[in-house]
Image: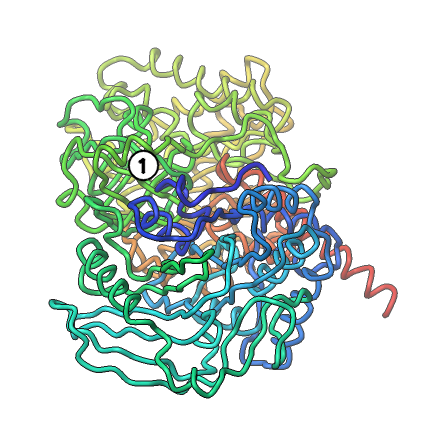
């Protein structure tokens, strides 16, 4: 375990690692409010722990990177699976370095007891997300290594209990999107515990004797106080029904409640205590004063939990939880969007409303804030460290370009260009889809944490990396990334996006203009050199070069007639049939690469609408002689739904393989524009119609005896579908560089499960 996070040192960019409960408490503590000291065991420790459970029969071994598919309506199955998951965790051994790190940090407090509080962060928060308070319980333990190990496992295992699995599935949140960290704090016996809930109607304070467990578990009716918010006057007070309380120790009149290490238990209160208010008057006044102080920062609607600890001879009031603290960081405003590319980064905003041709060059190291991104932005994106767009979804151009460049991105951030001022300091969180507007002194404590493409492949856990049979390919367009990517464990380039590859060279002009201006030789030379760079870097591994696929509006040209300004236009091979001049240069560039000795280049035709279009292109390929190289293959993108009906005809016409483009296939099957983020949250690649089409294409390819790849964003955005792809016999999966490592592991797990299932069938019949 590389790092623990102390409450008084947690920064804004640590939120996803430490969870919301710890993050909000840290902000309150850092502003001087009374919070018990503590540190956080970050969410990555749970993932590393689950990775150590590497048995092929382990249910939890693959949970960090894939979904658990359960029928939550089948209560018996749910209980069986939840029970087995938790049992696997409880029976496992926590790596000694994890336990020792927690123990050594806790020893600083010279305490006998610890409390471990679950603290959650959800990578993608849905609109219908419910309140997670009470979903997972705090765990108490002795401050020794054996007890700490047991308490860690108990806390982690709660994520997989039945009510938790039901909650996350009903909220539409996959388990791999849930980050569970653990807040560790020293704990002492309490005189009283309770809560303060503030809203527009006033304040309500609840209190009970002892530790807060009795209140949390609904075992008592607490004392309550109605407070007038403006004056702090107690308007009403009601004595509760408090027969029992909880305390630390070993001798209890009632059953103890714990994890294998009994250190907390219930006891019956004396009759006189039952008839007394649990909250002494002086501490009632302190809570009211504290509420007024917090109200100035949190607004009228907030809630806290508190405890009065028996600290030495003088009891002390502490805050143990804060809820609804949206404004807990002063001068910070928050914009919610969709996380499209992983990572976090802080930088100044560059707000651009006009198209790139109408603006000055972008400053280096800024976060670009724009209505939307089109492909012609690419040459300018090399300068930015993050992207925020008002439009777009997970398969928008902004999302795809950011993932390839390895920079964080948030899309579908409504009114971002209106709310954010040019030059103001931002922090964007591409994992959670959040944009923070922050003041300067807060920004000084924030480190830059953009996502990085690994220059070499290092598994998360040091164990032998399994071999995989399914080919793993990479999607690329930028030659500047070749050095970083070529050593990743990939079998080649599954999608070389030609239009994005060319954009930095075209100087904002359509290739047709280069030809009209007599610059064909110059264009051909540069085009050939670009293709050769990729072929040379990955040889002898194949490179699937996708020929130009521009929609009409994506690269303007005053001299080129466009029949449409729609989202489709005359894109794909239809544009070659209308005017083949640029396609002829493109084929000549591939031929030049072949003449230079590179036989690993294959051609992938985009957006093919008809067999006639394919035949036209095949004849062009034959005329220039590309097919004379024995290894050369001519494929098509399977993205226009007509391919579901015409694939046998395409194969007869000479198609050697298909690559499923899930982005366009989803658009056309469901009528969803990839740039519209709101619709794509519901209508996406997981839709039964899309998954059915993908399955049908794999089966038809197998029948026709041709390979079937997938190069859209679906396996990256929804890694849970990789199981289905592998099971159905997909030939290869092509993903962005940043997703290579986790996709490799997902493929390996899927293949191992297939092997295990086949072995069981052979043994048991």
Which residue sits at x=56%, y=66%?
248
Q: Give residue 526's position: percent from left, percent from top.
A: 39, 14
Which residue sits at x=20%, y=42%?
371
Which residue sits at x=57%, y=73%?
162
Q: Is residue 752 visible?
A: yes
> Residue 669 or 69: which is nearer the viewer?
69
**477 relative to 613, above or below:** above
Residue 55 is left or right of residue 249, and the answer is right
**412 relative to 597, above or below:** below
> Residue 566 or 223: which is nearer the viewer?
223
Residue 279 is left or right of residue 225, and the answer is right
Counting the numbered discs, the total is 1
Q: Give residue 47's position: percent from left, percent from top.
A: 59, 49
Give the residue number, with chain letter if any, for mark 1. 550
Q: Give residue 349's position: percent from left, percent from top.
A: 21, 33
Residue 96 is left or right of residue 739, and the answer is right
Q: Does dot 1 land on a helix, a strand or a loop?
A: loop
Q: Quadrant of the C terminus?
A: bottom right
Residue 372 is left or right of residue 207, and the answer is left
């Amino acid at each position: 375990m590389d790092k623990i996070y102390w409450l008084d040192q947690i920064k804004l960019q640590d939120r996803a690692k430490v969870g919301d409960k710890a993050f909000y408490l840290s902000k309150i503590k850092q502003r001087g409010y009374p919070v018990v000291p503590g540190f956080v065991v970050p969410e990555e420790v749970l993932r590393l722990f689950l990775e150590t459970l590497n048995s092929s029969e382990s249910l939890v071994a693959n949970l960090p990177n894939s979904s658990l598919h359960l029928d939550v309506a089948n209560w018996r199955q749910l209980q069986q699976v939840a029970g087995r998951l938790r049992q696997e965790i409880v029976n496992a051994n926590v790596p000694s370095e994890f336990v020792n790190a927690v123990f050594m940090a806790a020893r600083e407090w010279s305490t006998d007891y610890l409390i471990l509080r679950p603290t959650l962060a959800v990578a993608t928060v849905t609109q219908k997300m419910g309140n997670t308070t009470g979903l997972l319980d705090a765990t108490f333990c002795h401050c020794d290594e054996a007890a700490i190990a047991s308490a860690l496992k108990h806390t982690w295992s709660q994520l997989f209990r039945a009510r938790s699995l039901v909650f996350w599935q009903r909220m539409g949140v996959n388990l791999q999107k849930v980050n569970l960290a653990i807040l560790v704090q020293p704990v002492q016996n309490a005189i009283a515990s309770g809560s303060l809930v503030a809203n527009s109607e006033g304040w309500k304070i609840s209190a009970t004797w002892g530790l807060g467990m009795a209140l949390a578990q609904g075992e008592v009716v607490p004392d309550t106080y109605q407070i007038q918010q403006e004056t702090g006057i107690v308007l009403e007070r009601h004595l509760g029904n408090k027969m029992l309380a909880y305390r630390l120790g070993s001798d209890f009149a009632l059953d103890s409640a714990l994890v294998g290490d009994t250190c907390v238990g219930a006891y019956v209160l004396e009759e006189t205590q039952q008839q007394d208010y649990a909250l002494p008057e002086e501490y009632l006044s302190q809570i009211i004063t504290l509420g007024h102080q917090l109200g100035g920062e949190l607004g009228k609607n907030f809630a806290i939990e508190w405890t009065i600890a028996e600290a030495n001879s003088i009891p002390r009031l502490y805050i143990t939880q804060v809820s609804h603290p949206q404004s807990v960081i002063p001068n910070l405003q928050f914009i919610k969007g969709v996380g499209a590319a992983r990572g976090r980064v802080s930088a100044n905003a560059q707000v651009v409303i006009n198209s790139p041709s109408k603006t000055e060059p972008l400053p280096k190291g800024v976060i670009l804030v724009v209505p939307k991104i089109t492909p012609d932005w690419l040459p300018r994106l090399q300068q930015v460290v993050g992207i925020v767009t008002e439009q777009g979804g997970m398969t928008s151009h902004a999302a795809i370009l950011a993932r390839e460049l390895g920079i964080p991105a948030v899309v579908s951030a409504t009114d971002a260009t209106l709310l954010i001022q040019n030059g103001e300091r931002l922090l964007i969180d591409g994992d959670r889809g959040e944009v923070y507007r922050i003041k300067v002194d807060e920004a000084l404590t924030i480190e830059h944490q953009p996502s990085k493409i690994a220059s070499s492949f290092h598994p998360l856990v040091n164990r032998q990396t399994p071999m995989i049979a399914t080919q793993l390919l990479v999607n690329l367009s930028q030659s500047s990334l070749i050095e970083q990517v070529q050593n990743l464990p990939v079998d080649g380039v599954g999608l070389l996006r030609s239009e994005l590859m060319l954009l930095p060279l075209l100087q904002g002009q359509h290739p047709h203009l280069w030809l009209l201006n007599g610059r064909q030789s110059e264009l051909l030379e540069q085009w050939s050199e670009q293709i050769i760079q990729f072929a040379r870097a990955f040889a002898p591994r194949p490179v699937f070069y996708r020929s130009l696929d521009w929609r009409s509006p994506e690269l303007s040209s005053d001299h080129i007639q466009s029949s449409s300004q729609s989202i489709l236009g005359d894109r794909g091979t239809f544009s070659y049939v209308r005017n083949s001049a640029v396609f002829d240069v493109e084929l000549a560039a591939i031929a030049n690469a072949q003449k230079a000795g590179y036989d690993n280049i294959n051609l992938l035709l985009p957006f093919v609408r008809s067999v006639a279009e394919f035949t036209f292109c095949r004849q062009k390929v034959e005329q220039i002689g590309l097919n004379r190289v024995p290894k050369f293959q001519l494929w098509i993108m399977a993205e226009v739904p007509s391919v579901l009906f015409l694939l046998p005809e395409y194969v007869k016409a000479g198609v050697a393989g298909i690559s499923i483009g899930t982005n366009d296939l989803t658009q056309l099957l469901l009528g969803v524009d990839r740039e519209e983020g709101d619709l794509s949250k519901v209508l996406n690649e997981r839709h039964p119609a899309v998954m059915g089409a993908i399955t049908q294409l794999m089966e038809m390819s197998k029948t026709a005896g041709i390979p079937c790849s997938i190069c859209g964003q679906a396996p990256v955005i929804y890694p849970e579908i990789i199981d289905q792809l592998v099971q159905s016999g997909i030939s290869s999966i092509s993903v962005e560089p940043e997703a290579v490592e986790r996709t490799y592991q997902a493929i390996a797990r899927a293949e191992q499960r297939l092997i295990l299932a086949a072995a069981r069938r052979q043994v048991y019949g």
